Image (cartoon, rainbow, N blue to C red):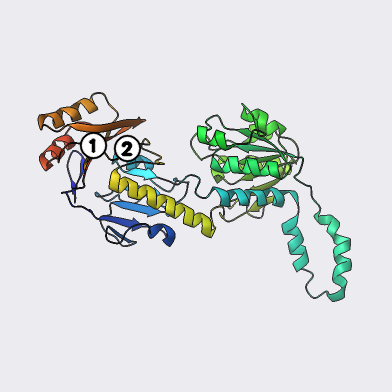
Amino acid sequence: MTTKHPSAKVSYDPGTDKPSYKIKTLNKISSDGLSLFELDRYEIGSEIQNPDAIVLRSCKMLDMDLPDTLLAVGRAGIGVNNIPIEKCTERGVVVMNTPGANANAVKELAILGLLLSSRKILEGLVFSQSLKGKGTEIPNIIEEQKKNYGGQEIAGKQLGVIGLGKIGVMLANSALDLGMNVVGYDPFISVEAAWGLSRDVEREEGLDRLVAKSDYISIHTPLTDETRGLIDMEKFQRMKKGVRLLNFSRGGIVNNDDLKKAIETGVVAGYVTDFPDDDLINSKNVICIPHLGASTREAESNCAQMMARQMKDFLENGNIINSVNFPTCSLERTSSYRLLIANRNIPNMVGQISTILAREDINIVEMLNKSRDEIAYNIIDISSHASKAIIQAMAKTKGVVTVRLLSHE
């Protein structure tokens, strides 16, 4: 049962064994994922009113009014630029995505991009189709014209990978298997990614050095204020003449005006992007793929299943995994009673919460407190049931954004 409090959002479970949850879908989500939500505990549909959670793919919800009941938003995919992150954080709504779930699909398309940028395959296909009706002349015409559709091999060439997350690491390792020399750049590489990266991938400390030495450059970094327009004229001027550039990350990372100038001057011999823009479609040496990076049955299934498991863990246990606006916070259940509190990241919040519990003779069995930027999150297993009065007292505490009580008796 969820109610609106003037100071904070309160979600109070009165103590049922299996509290029910409502999930609103904004896109078609793979049944492989939705089937993980038990029908006796979850109500799921596109017309759900007052949802506890929203699950979506690429649907834009930037101008959407967030329901007062909303606790979490789950993106079955990696990009979250279609979600109002700041508004969600202000309202205490956890936003999660599924990094790595579609990595193999994107990696495979990036490998295709390497080949498409190197060999005039698409032009050759168009030429072949134009020969319909030529009959026995076709073999001779092909032998005469095939010289117009030559290219180069990728083996022995240098690939520079910008961004060594799951996709970047998988592409780097696969490119090595294809005989390429690979250099990677990522100042924020995670420990998990570093463990998965082949020792044969050269690590470059500076982006300028990477773009200067690479025959091919593949972008795999999120679109942020820092990366918007990252590949601009200054970077193009450092590149080898005839470089091939691949963008399977986000369109805004490459400055299109500067790109077209680099193509005209011969610096960029080919650009393959999964994010078509009106000013690039049908441009010279540009291949626009219609955002097919994650458009495989396997990727959609993986993303949906990963999101379902994360959402279930959050709704049922309060654990937060792969959030883009809240800290990662996960604690094994040690009690039947669990408090979940989101608050502004200001001093003495834990002390105030502990004081309220102590006044009611409620012990803290186990507690985890994490913060991220201006928001903090607390998972608190307590010794006994907390009354509505206690929950309301916490909700009125300055700085508290949301209070949830999970009670599995």
On the image, which quarter does residue 91 sit in?
top left
Q: Which residue is mark 2?
A: 331
- Residue sitting at the far top: 347
Amino acid on which the number 2 mark rests in the picture = Leu
Please name the residue that numbered disc 1 is placed on: 381
The residue at 76%/52% (across/down) is 119
- What is the distance, in whole Å, between disc 1 and disc 2 at their CAs? 9 Å
- How far across and down, in percent of the image, does residue 155 sit? 76, 43
In front here: 325 or 328? 328
Residue 349 location in percent, x, y?
Answer: 23, 27
Q: Position of residue 355 (x, y in %)?
A: 15, 27
Q: State the count of labels.
A: 2
Mark 1 and 2 residues: CB-CB less than 8 Å, in contact?
yes
Picture coordinates of residue 248, whole percent (x, y): 58, 47
- Element under label 2? loop
Horizontal relation, residue 299 to residue 86: left or right = right
| Label 2 crowd (10 A; few <14 / some 14-19 / many >=20) | some
Residue closer to the observer: 236 or 370 = 370
What residue appears at the point 64 percent right and 31 percent down from the top-left corner? Answer: 234
Local SS, label 1: strand
Say if 77 sits above or below 191 in the image: below
- Mark 1 Cα shell of 10 Å, populated few (<14), some (14-19), many (≥20): many
Q: Looking at the image, is 367 positioned above or below residue 310? A: above
Amino acid carrying mark 1 in the image: Asp
Task: Choose the circle earlier in sequence order: 1 or 2.
Answer: 2
Q: Is residue 198 above or below residue 348?
A: below
Identify which residue is drawn at 67% across, 28% down: 209
